[in-house]
């Protein structure tokens, strides 16, 4: 079993065997350490400080789930987002940003309600979905950016 880690230096996808993740993997292209690098196939946590590098400078399409831990609809779609992250592993990066503790990005993007799903392609937001949408609708939006 292996996982895909995205290099924070050059953006290249690196396949890392899960049994060797503890050995501090490095990027095969540029040699940058992959410690703390986002992993494709799971929902990665995101902070205000990481947003520009991981989302707006990403070589891969990105889905950002803007949520609040106390939000019921956010908790309802969390398993759906996790399932989609796994289904689109290697083709889509999925992040989750807590708007209650990471408010700068939410404010800058004028996020008024949660859950809000942001869809990025080539570093530009190309779509936005507000509310707890059904999985088929989210999946259809993902397919448009791939």
Image: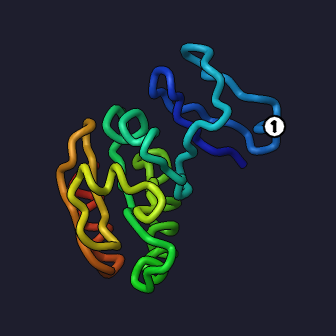
Measured as percent of width and height from the top left, residue 49 is found at 45, 39
Q: Secondary structure at mark 1?
A: helix
Q: Residues within 10 Å of mark 1 (few under 14, many from 20)?
A: few
Viewer-side residue, 53 vs 94: 53
Q: Is residue 86 above or below residue 57?
A: below
Is residue 27 at least partly visible in the picture?
yes
Which residue is depicted at the point 46% across and 39% down? 50
Which residue is depicted at the point 50% across and 21% down? 9
Measured as percent of width and height from the top left, residue 56 is found at 31, 37
Measured as percent of width and height from the top left, residue 10 is found at 46, 21
* Quadrant of residue 64 within the rendered picture: bottom left
Mark 1 lies on residue: 22
Q: Is residue 107 above or below residue 80?
A: above
Is residue 96 at least partly visible in the picture?
no
Relative to 112, 47 lies left or right: right
Measured as percent of width and height from the top left, residue 27 is found at 61, 22
Which residue is depicted at the point 58% across and 41% down? 4
Q: Is residue 124 above or below residue 142?
A: above
Relative to 33, 11 lies left or right: left
Which residue is depicted at the point 44% across and 48% down? 93
* Count of numbered circles on the image: 1
């Amino acid at each position: 079993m292996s996982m895909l880690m995205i290099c924070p230096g050059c953006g290249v996808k690196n396949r890392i065997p899960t049994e060797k993740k503890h050995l501090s993997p490095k990027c095969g292209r540029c040699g940058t350490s992959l410690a703390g690098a986002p992993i494709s196939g799971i929902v990665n946590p995101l902070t205000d400080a990481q947003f520009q590098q991981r989302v707006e400078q990403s070589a891969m399409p990105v889905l950002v789930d803007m949520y609040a831990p106390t939000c019921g609809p956010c908790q309802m779609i969390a398993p759906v987002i996790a399932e989609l992250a796994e289904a689109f592993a290697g083709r889509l990066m999925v992040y989750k940003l807590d708007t209650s503790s990471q408010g700068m990005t939410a404010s800058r993007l004028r996020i008024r309600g949660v859950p809000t799903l942001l869809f990025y392609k080539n570093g530009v937001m190309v779509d936005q979905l507000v509310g707890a949408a059904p999985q088929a609708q989210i999946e259809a939006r993902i397919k448009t950016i791939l």
